[in-house]
Image (cartoon, rainbow, N blue to C red):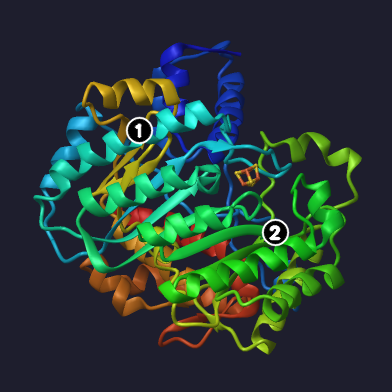
Amino acid sequence: MIWTEEAEELLGAAPAFVRGQIREKTEAQARGAQRTEIDAAFVKSLQSGGRHPGDNFPPPRVTEDPIHGAFDRKYGVHAGMSGGSAVTENPADLFFQCLENTADTNAPAMAYLHVPFCCTRCLFCGFYAETTEPTAIASYTDAVVRDIELTGSVLRHTGRKLSAVYFGGGTPTDLQADELDKLIRTIRRELPLTDDCEITVEGRLYDFTDEKVSAALDAGANRFSFGVQSFDTKIRRMMGRILGREELIERLNRMVELGDPYNAAVVIDLIYALPGQREAEWVDSIDCGVNETGIHGLDLYQINLLPATPLMKKLHALPPMADLKQQADLFLAGRARMMEHGFDRLSIAHWGRDPRERNRYNLWNKRDVDCVPLGAGAGGRWSGCRFFQQSDVHRFSGSVAEKLKPVISASRNPACASVIAEATGQIEQRIIDIPVLEACAGRSLGKLLFPMLGEWKRAGLLEGEDPFRLTAAGEFWSVNLQKLMGLKLMKLAG
Ligand code: SF4
């Protein structure tokens, strides 16, 4: 299948972790339409159409065993809204207009800064883009400084303040100490931040030296989020991770010690349903994180099998992965274990044991809170529009050198976007609160939603009514509920 240069550019504007999926779906659509070439018009027609004709999202069925039988498949791993319309304006001009047209200066807002480098390649990773190369990272850091300055020159005059900044990737911890220092200090100098702004550095414990940690803390970082995935050394090595169990425990405890004087939170991700992973290992990884380290938060995720990852290509040569029913059992086992450990539930996947873990960026991200994109390949949104930045590092650097904000595509959210985002955020926090949704939509929603919510109750996915609460089965199938709710609310937009 041939992709024209403009079509490739549009694809490059999507976040790195979904690009492979979009490429596959677009090519399948093109084959269905008997095309041999994909041009920009074809990509845009799919973007504005939102759903693909082949997509089918049946409602839950009523069974005795909802966690194993309510649906045949998950409708995605993360919830996300589709269906925005492409814009005709220059996307970078539109971005600055949106910043300037901020209606509510008290509304929460945040920033996402993308670091598209990593020195390793984990089998399951869909975020990775460029191999870490010191000169390239140094010049990328300078380019991002220019991007922050460009953005700050407008944002500072809007009266809006950012309450969360997230350094994601890739692996921001692959930056050198002076680069971390430079980026965090530039953010704090150029962007209007609240006094309690959460500043997260995401990454990997390997090669995140004391010098780097101290540089990040001194510059203003107050939260570290590490992808540990598993404490089982054998499984970790199979996935391409470098550190073993003992080194991980030691580094995590050192992180907690270094961060303590700064009241910094240290949180980790663990993944279930990795190849060869069974319940005993899964629960042991949770226990290890909770009992043997001083971490403040723990996130439990199901593995996301992305089409373009090495994991998909190597599946045949790896030990079997849990099927959907076994994944449900792993989910239940993890949930029960975290309750036994007495952690607070911050959302379906996030758990905290210390008030310093606020998880602000992740919670707000689900609610589509306005977010400034910074760095190559970053996505963001502001005042009802979505924006994607140039993902090619060289073009990104060229653009900011000419003082041009490297936003290369934008779309307008449909009218119902805010109520869909509110519903998605509520489900993420295990409730459905109709009066709050109605206040957000500015109209009554009972007729539209009650029949569907009644079905979900009968299927064992919800309980109560004021508000509705997700059952354990509802939590496991939450992404399906978010999808179905989004499609239902799309009817509001006609
Ligand atoms: S360390 Fe993170 S960014 Fe790098 S390959 Fe592994 S999962 Fe991807």
Secondary structure beneath disc 1?
helix
Mark 1: give few (<14), some (14-19) or many (20+) Cα within 10 Å.
some
Left or right, residue 370 beside residue 278: left
Q: Which residue is mark 2?
A: 229
Q: Residue at x 63, y 37 (%)?
A: 119
Relative to the observer, which residue lies in front, 326 or 276?
276
Rendered position, 295 above or below 95: below
Q: Determine which of the numbered discs, if any, sits on residue 236 in the image.
A: none
Left or right, residue 113 beside residue 91: right
Confirm whether residue 348 shows in the render.
no
Q: Determine which of the numbered discs, if any, sits on residue 142 in the image.
A: 1
Relative to the observer, which residue lies in front, 434 or 116?
116
Rendering quarter of residue 349: bottom right
User: How many badges with numbers are in the image?
Assistant: 2
Q: Position of residue 75 (x, y in %)?
A: 60, 53
Rendering quarter of residue 410: top left
* Amino acid type, label 1: Asp
Relative to the observer, which residue lies in front, 389 or 171?
171
Q: Is mark 2 within 8 Å of ligand 1?
A: yes
* Amino acid type, label 2: Gln
Q: Residue at x 39, y 45 (%)?
A: 113
Q: Nearer the viewer, mark 2 or mark 1?
A: 1
Confirm whether residue 5 shows in the render.
yes
Ligand 1 appears in which quadrant?
A: top right
